[in-house]
């Protein structure tokens, strides 16, 4: 089985078949050969040596996100926290585990990356940036909110990644930003953390987002409300929002 997959290079089709009934909305294959040092800077030894990243995304239900302007309503907040965050992250983790196990069984070294785990809590840094891998795979661009923005669903998508050395046709084709002059996420941000600056490949997060302001806003919500729910930047983005 391993020789068959390797020689025919049908790994992508095998992954598509595996995910056929998982209700995922995005699958991308990223060539990470130019980004090995960047990956290792945050992820350390465990992420070294992987040539490719498989990016998998699930769109959030508009039936919940469209009501986030009333997120102080406990019914809306609980729906978002449970079904747009916890449940989808759990699904993504299980999906990534299945994909990695399948590829490992074929003799292809693979590593699933947790959906929402932060290895550096103070700076919200994960083992691997899922949006970076999705960006490289051409699934979207980095918006002014620092979220990945897709053409169809805007930022209303959660992603997960599987690193692998399986024989896939990974691409390095990041989409250019299409936010242009839009300032909607900046204007609606309750923490005034979004600076309204377009992403550039040589920029850092702090150029576009005052991360500490964002974190302090969430800390305040945790103290004053049961549900620490915001999501205003993904709610307001014209991409993915119902016209």
Image: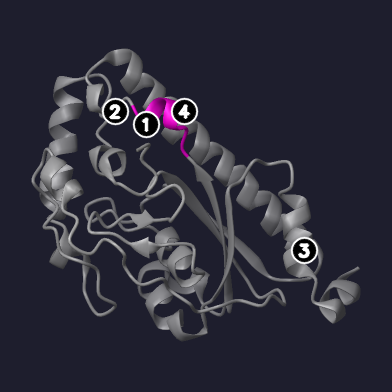
Distance between the alpha carbons at the discs numbered 2 and 1: 5 Å
Q: Position of residue 156 (x, y in %)?
A: 40, 44
**Element on which disc 1 rests:** helix
**Element on which disc 2 rests:** helix
Query: Which residue is labeled 1 in the image?
Result: 65
The reply, left or right, for residue 165 in relation to residue 129 is right
Q: Position of residue 10 (x, y in %)?
A: 80, 71
Query: On residue 83, which mark appears?
Result: 4
Query: Which residue is labeled 3 in the image?
Result: 13
**Element on which disc 4 rests:** helix
N-terminal of the two: label 1 or label 4? 1
Do tag 2 and tag 1 residues touch (Cβ < 8 Å)? yes
Q: Residues within 10 Å of mark 4 (few under 14, many from 20)?
A: some
Figure quadrant of residue 234: top left
Most foreground residue, 158 or 101: 158
Distance between the alpha carbons at the discs numbered 1 and 4: 10 Å
Query: Where, quadrant-wise, is the C terminus in this rendering?
Result: top left
Q: Residues within 10 Å of mark 1 (few under 14, many from 20)?
A: many
N-terminal of the two: label 3 or label 1? 3
N-terminal of the two: label 4 or label 2? 2
Query: Which residue is labeled 2 in the image?
Result: 68
Distance between the alpha carbons at the discs numbered 3 and 1: 32 Å
| Residue at (26% x, 61% y) in the render | 179
Q: Position of residue 188 (x, y in %)?
A: 15, 40
Image: 228 above or below 103: above
Distance between the alpha carbons at the discs numbered 2 and 3: 37 Å
**Element on which disc 3 rests:** helix
Which stretch did the figure color magenta? 60-66
Most foreground residue, 8 or 240: 240
Distance between the alpha carbons at the discs numbered 4 and 3: 29 Å
Residue 190 in sight in this render: yes
Image: 209 above or below 230: below
């Amino acid at each position: 089985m391993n020789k068959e997959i390797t020689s025919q290079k049908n790994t992508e089709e095998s992954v598509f078949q595996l995910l056929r009934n998982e209700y995922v909305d995005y699958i991308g294959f990223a060539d990470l050969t130019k980004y090995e040092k960047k990956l290792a800077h945050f992820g350390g030894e465990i992420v070294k040596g992987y040539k490719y990243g498989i990016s998998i995304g699930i769109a959030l239900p508009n039936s919940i996100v469209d009501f986030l302007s009333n997120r102080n309503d406990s019914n809306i907040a609980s729906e978002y926290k449970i079904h747009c965050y916890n449940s989808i992250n759990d699904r993504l983790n299980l999906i990534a585990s299945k994909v990695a196990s399948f590829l490992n069984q074929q003799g292809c070294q693979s590593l699933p990356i947790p959906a929402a785990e932060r290895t550096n809590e103070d700076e919200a840094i994960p083992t691997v940036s899922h949006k970076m891998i999705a960006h490289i795979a051409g699934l979207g661009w980095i918006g002014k909110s620092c979220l990945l923005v897709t053409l169809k669903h805007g930022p209303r998508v959660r992603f997960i990644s599987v690193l692998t050395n399986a024989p896939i046709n990974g691409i390095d084709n990041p989409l250019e930003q299409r936010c242009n002059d839009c300032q909607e996420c900046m204007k609606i941000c309750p923490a005034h953390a979004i600076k309204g600056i377009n992403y550039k490949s040589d920029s850092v997060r702090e150029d576009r987002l005052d991360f500490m302001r964002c974190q302090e806003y969430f800390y305040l919500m945790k103290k004053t409300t049961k549900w620490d729910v915001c999501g205003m930047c993904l709610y307001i983005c014209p991409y993915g929002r119902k016209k």
